[in-house]
Image (cartoon, rainbow, N blue to C red):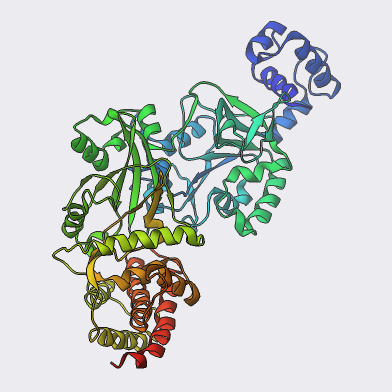
C-alpha cells in the first residue's frame, strides 16, 4: 500500500467513515483517489464492506503503535553563538525549555519511555531524569562526531519509535497515539542544507549534496520493520570515518530515497532553532537572548539589539571564537577570547599594536578593540580567502608582506621574549609534560637560546604568529591579521613561524627562507631560522599542553610541534660550528 492508503485508513480508524466529503476535508485528496484507496483497503481486509475497520486493522494498529522516543541532544550547538553556555535543547521558548516541550507533548499521547542522547554539557540534562523519569544515553564523542553517532548509540531503541532533534519547537503536538507507517517530517519550504525533496508519491528522494530540498524538520517515526534497516545502516556508516560528521537522517536513506514517507508540516507548526536569530524570531522575550556579546555590540554601535542581524558563529580558532553579525546591512566580525586566552595574552599590549599599525595597510580594519576584555570588532570581508600553504606563488606574496612589515622597523614598548613565554606557559600548565623526554628536549632549547644570545639580533615589531591562515587575500590586496602575540622580536622568528604552522619539512622551510632573502641567505640567517623553528615548536608544545589542561584539547598539534623542536635542533646544531660561537 502507498502513503495515501495508510492516511485514509488512519482517518477512518480515528474518526470513523462518515462520508466521502469528510475524508476529503481531512486529507485533501480527491473523491477519485479516496474511492481507489477504499477499494484497496477493502480488498486487503483492512475495511469491511461498510468501510469500517476490521480485526486485521486493529491488530495492525496494535503492532504499529508508538512505544518510545529518542531525543538527540548531544551537539555543541556552535551556530548558536553568542549563546554558548546552554545546550540547544534547553533554550527556552515561552518560558519552557525546548526539550521539556517535546517531552510533555509525548506524554500527552501516552509515551513515557523516553531516551535522551546527551553529550555537550550533559550534566545540564540530569534534572530531567527526576522530573520526567527519562533515561539519558551518554555520547562521549560529541565533540568529534555528529548526530549519526548519537542515533547509533540508541539503535536498540528504534522499534516503533519517534526520533526527535532536541532543538525543534512544535507549536502543535506532532505525536499521535497511533501511527500507521514510517515517516520523516519536512516543511513546505526549500532549504539549501537539505538533501531530500518530496516527489509525487510523497516519497523523500535524494537530491544530491549540492542541490537543496524540502527543509528537514528533525522528526521521524519508525516502525519495527523499517528500524531493522536503519540499524544495519547505522552500524555500517559508523564504521566509516568519513561519516563521523554526518547527521542522523543519512541512516534513513536506502539508495536514492528514504525508507520513510514524507510528512509535510505546514506553516510554523515546527520550528528548528539553530541560530540566535532563529530563537529571537521565535520568541523575542526568551531569557536566553540576554547576551553579553550582543549588549557589547549594541554599546559599541549605539543601537538596539533588534538592529544586530545575520548573527552566526563562524568558527572556533586555536585561541579565540568568532561571531559574524551585521549592522545596517554591513558585515562585521566579533572576536571572542577563548578559554584561558586572557591569561596568556596581554590585551593592552595588543591594543597598542593596533594603534601602531593604524593606517599602515598591513592588517585588518579594526572598528573597536577592548584592552580590558579582549573583544575585537573588525569589518568582515565577504570575498576574502586565506593563503594556501601549498601554493608557493601565494606563499611568496605572504612572505613579502611579512618582510614589508619588518622593513618598516616599527617599535613598541614590549617584547616577545621566548624564554619568558616558555616559562610562563609552563607555570600556567602547572603539571608535568605528557612527553617522557621533555626535560632533555628543554635543555636543548636552552642551549639554542644561549647561542642566539651571543649573536646579533635583527629586531623590530614582529607578528610572532605568522600562520598562513592569518594572511588574508582581499581584492588583490594582502593583510596580516590577529596580532595577539606581536611584539619586539628577531625577524627570523616570524619566518620560522610561517614554516611550522604550515607543517613544512626542511626543504619547504628552506624555500621560505630563500624567498624572504631573495636567494641570498647567510649561514647565520639559516641557523637562526632553524633555531627559532625548534624553539617555536617547543613553545607551542607547552602552549597546547596548557590549553589541554584548560579543557581545550589541541589534538595532535602538540605532537607535531614537539617534533619540530627536536628535528630542527639537530639542523641548527649542524650549522653552529660555522658561526664561531
What residue sits 34% from the left and 44% below the top? 323
What residue sits 73% from the left and 39% below the top? 256
Residue 549, located in which quarter of the rendered image?
bottom left
Q: Which of 442 and 276 is in front in this view?
A: 442
The quarter in which the C terminus is drawn is bottom left
Q: Nearer the viewer, residue 509 or 5?
A: 509
Q: Where residue 451 appears, x then y in whole percent?
A: 27, 87
Q: Where residue 214 appears, x then y in whole percent?
A: 59, 30
455 relative to 371, above or below: below
The quarter in which the N terminus is drawn is top right
Q: Which of 431 and 490 is in front in this view?
A: 490
114 relative to 345, above or below: above
Q: Where residue 404 appears, x then y in whole percent?
A: 30, 60
Q: Where residue 367 appears, x then y in whole percent?
A: 23, 42
What residue sits 62% from the left and 41% below the top? 209
565 relative to 196, above or below: below
Answer with left or right where residue 83 lies relative to residue 72. Answer: left
Amino acid at each position: 500500500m502507498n502513503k495515501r492508503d495508510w492516511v485514509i485508513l488512519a482517518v477512518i480508524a480515528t474518526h470513523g467513515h462518515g462520508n466521502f466529503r469528510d475524508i476529503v476535508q481531512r486529507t485533501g485528496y480527491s473523491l477519485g483517489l479516496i474511492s481507489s484507496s477504499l477499494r484497496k483497503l477493502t480488498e486487503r481486509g483492512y475495511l469491511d464492506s461498510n468501510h469500517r475497520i476490521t480485526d486485521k486493522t486493529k491488530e495492525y494498529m496494535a503492532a504499529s503503535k508508538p512505544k518510545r522516543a529518542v531525543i538527540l541532544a548531544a551537539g555543541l550547538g556552535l551556530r548558536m553563538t553568542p549563546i554558548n553556555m546552554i545546550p540547544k535543547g534547553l533554550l527556552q521558548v515561552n518560558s519552557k525549555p525546548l526539550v521539556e516541550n517535546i517531552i510533555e507533548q509525548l506524554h500527552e499521547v501516552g509515551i513515557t519511555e523516553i531516551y535522551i542522547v546527551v553529550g555537550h554539557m550533559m550534566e545540564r540534562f540530569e534534572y530531567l531524569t527526576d522530573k520526567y523519569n527519562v533515561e539519558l544515553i551518554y555520547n562521549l564523542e560529541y565533540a568529534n562526531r555528529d548526530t549519526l553517532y548519537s542515533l547509533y548509540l540508541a539503535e536498540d531503541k528504534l522499534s516503533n519509535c519517534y526520533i526527535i532533534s532536541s532543538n525543534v519547537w512544535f507549536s502543535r503536538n506532532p505525536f499521535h497515539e497511533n501511527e500507521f507507517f514510517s515517516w520523516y517530517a519536512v516543511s513546505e519550504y526549500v532549504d539549501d542544507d537539505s538533501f531530500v525533496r518530496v516527489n509525487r508519491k510523497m516519497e523523500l528522494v535524494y537530491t544530491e549534496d549540492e542541490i537543496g530540498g524540502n527543509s528537514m524538520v528533525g522528526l521521524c517515526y519508525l516502525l519495527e520493520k523499517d528500524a531493522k534497516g536503519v540499524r544495519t545502516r547505522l552500524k555500517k556508516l559508523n564504521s566509516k570515518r568519513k561519516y563521523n560528521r554526518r547527521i542522523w537522517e543519512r541512516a534513513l536513506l536506502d539508495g536514492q530515497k528514504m525508507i520513510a514517507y514524507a510528512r509535510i508540516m505546514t506553516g510554523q507548526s515546527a520550528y528548528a532553532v539553530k541560530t540566535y536569530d532563529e530563537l529571537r524570531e521565535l520568541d523575542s522575550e526568551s531569557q536566553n537572548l540576554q547576551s553579553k556579546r550582543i549588549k557589547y555590540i549594541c554599546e559599541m554601535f549605539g543601537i538596539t539589539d533588534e538592529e544586530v542581524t545575520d548573527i552566526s558563529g563562524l568558527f572556533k580558532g586555536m585561541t579565540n571564537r568568532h561571531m559574524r553579525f551585521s549592522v545596517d546591512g554591513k558585515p562585521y566580525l566579533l572576536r571572542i577570547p577563548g578559554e584561558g586566552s586572557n591569561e596568556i595574552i596581554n590585551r593592552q599590549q595588543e591594543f597598542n599594536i593596533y594603534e601602531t599599525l593604524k593606517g599602515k595597510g598591513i592588517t585588518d580594519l579594526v572598528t573597536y578593540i577592548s584592552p580590558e576584555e579582549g573583544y575585537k570588532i573588525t569589518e568582515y570581508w565577504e570575498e576574502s580567502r586565506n593563503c594556501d600553504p601549498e601554493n608557493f606563488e601565494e606563499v611568496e606574496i605572504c612572505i613579502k608582506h611579512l618582510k614589508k612589515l619588518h622593513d618598516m622597523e616599527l617599535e613598541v614598548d614590549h617584547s616577545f621574549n621566548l624564554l619568558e613565554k616558555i616559562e610562563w606557559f609552563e607555570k600556567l600548565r602547572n603539571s608535568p609534560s605528557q612527553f617522557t623526554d621533555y626535560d632533555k628536549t628543554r635543555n636543548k632549547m636552552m642551549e639554542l637560546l644561549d647561542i642566539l644570545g651571543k649573536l646579533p639580533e635583527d629586531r623590530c615589531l614582529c607578528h610572532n604568529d605568522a600562520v598562513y591562515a592569518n594572511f588574508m587575500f582581499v581584492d588583490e590586496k594582502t593583510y596580516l591579521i590577529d596580532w595577539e602575540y606581536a611584539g619586539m622580536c628577531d625577524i627570523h622568528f616570524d619566518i620560522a613561524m610561517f614554516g611550522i604552522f604550515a607543517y613544512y619539512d626542511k626543504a619547504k622551510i628552506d624555500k621560505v627562507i630563500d624567498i624572504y632573502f631573495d636567494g641570498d641567505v647567510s649561514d647565520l640567517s639559516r641557523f637562526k631560522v632553524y633555531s627559532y623553528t625548534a624553539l617555536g615548536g617547543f613553545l607551542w608544545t607547552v602552549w597546547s599542553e596548557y590549553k589541554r589542561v584548560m579543557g581545550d584539547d589541541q589534538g595532535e598539534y602538540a605532537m607535531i610541534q614537539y617534533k619540530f623542536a627536536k628535528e630542527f635542533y639537530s639542523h641548527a646544531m649542524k650549522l653552529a660550528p660555522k658561526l664561531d660561537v
